[in-house]
Image (cartoon, helix red, strand yellow):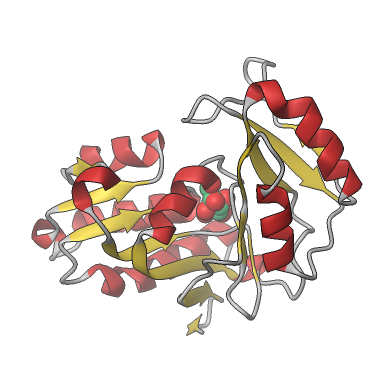
């Protein structure tokens, strides 16, 4: 199976976690795109009263299949949040934000009782950091934060919008530094250290609030841990 087929497979396995949940939390990315497409055709779609979304892209997709989107301020805490990841460890720590939605993802994850992480098998790692770690920053703090990230051993690069050639701007009006060459042996410590740099909005380590369930699409089966 291709990577995209594995994403589709694991998305299908996540549907069961959304049954009988009135207000669902929805992440961002291509795996979640498959999940929303499958939700559009599933028999319990009309039982879902609303969703809380982690990005403008996901909001538009949910609305296009007829699911109402609420702000987190309106919904209160959520039962379930489903999202993908760029890397995930056997301890259910994740590196996220390849799609640029890390801040809203982390807020909704923090407000959810159960985080269901859905990945294809290529995302499973023992030590995170091969995938560059996204750090969302206030634009005016970009250079300062980059210097601090270099002191932590990383090589930060400003994320660019490939079409415009301008810096990539998040849904929150901020910029992203993608940090290469980090070997993240202490994900909780690294998450806290980066959060403590003034000007950082969020970093893509989901270690303090990790996943409760990880589903991995492997082709022959979907494993759960
Ligand atoms: C977006 C994310 C995504 O969950 C992550 O990048 C995985 O994306 P995909 O499902 O496309 O592989 O964190 O900010």
The answer to whether 164 appears left or right of 23 in the picture is right
Does residue 205 lie above or below 117 as drawn?
above
Give me the residue at 65% from left, 49% from top.
Answer: 195
Give me the residue at 48% from left, 67% from top.
Answer: 117
Q: Nearer the viewer, residue 98 or 4?
A: 98
What is the quadrant of the N terminus in the image? bottom right
The answer to whether 152 appears left or right of 133 in the picture is right
Q: Position of residue 47 (x, y in %)?
A: 9, 62
Give me the residue at 30% from left, 35% from top.
Answer: 60
Q: Does residue 162 appear in this view? A: no
Does residue 223 lie above or below 183 as drawn?
below
Give me the residue at 56% from left, 40% from top.
Answer: 100
Q: Position of residue 160 (x, y in %)?
A: 69, 26
Q: Nearer the viewer, residue 104 or 69?
A: 104
Q: Nearer the viewer, residue 198 or 164?
A: 198
Q: Does residue 69 appear in this view? A: yes
Does residue 43 lie above or below 99 as drawn?
below
Residue 165: quadrant of the picture: top right
Looking at the image, the residue that sits furthest to the left is 46
Q: Position of residue 202 (x, y in %)?
A: 59, 45
The answer to whether 39 appears left or right of 202 in the picture is left
């Amino acid at each position: 199976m291709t990577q995209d087929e594995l994403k589709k497979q694991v998305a299908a396995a996540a549907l069961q976690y959304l049954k009988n949940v009135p207000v669902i939390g929805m992440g961002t990315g291509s795996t979640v795109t498959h999940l929303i497409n499958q939700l559009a055709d599933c028999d319990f779609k009309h039982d879902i009263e609303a969703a809380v979304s982690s990005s403008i892209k996901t909001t538009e997709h949910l609305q296009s299949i007829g699911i109402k989107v609420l702000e987190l301020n309106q919904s209160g805490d959520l039962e379930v949040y489903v999202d993908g990841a760029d890397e995930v460890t056997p301890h259910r720590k994740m590196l996220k934000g390849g799609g640029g939605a890390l801040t809203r993802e982390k807020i909704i994850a923090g407000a959810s009782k159960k985080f269901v992480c859905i990945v294809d098998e290529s995302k499973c790692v023992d030590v995170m950091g091969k995938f560059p770690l996204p750090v969302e920053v206030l634009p005016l703090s970009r250079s300062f934060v980059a210097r601090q990230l270099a002191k932590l051993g990383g090589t930060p690069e400003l994320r660019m919008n490939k079409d415009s050639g301008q810096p990539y701007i998040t849904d929150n009006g901020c910029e992203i530094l993608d940090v290469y060459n980090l070997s993240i042996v202490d994900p909780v410590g690294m998450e806290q250290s980066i959060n403590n740099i003034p000007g950082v909005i969020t970093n893509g380590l989901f270690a303090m609030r990790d996943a409760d369930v990880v589903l991995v699409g492997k082709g022959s089966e979907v494993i759960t841990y």
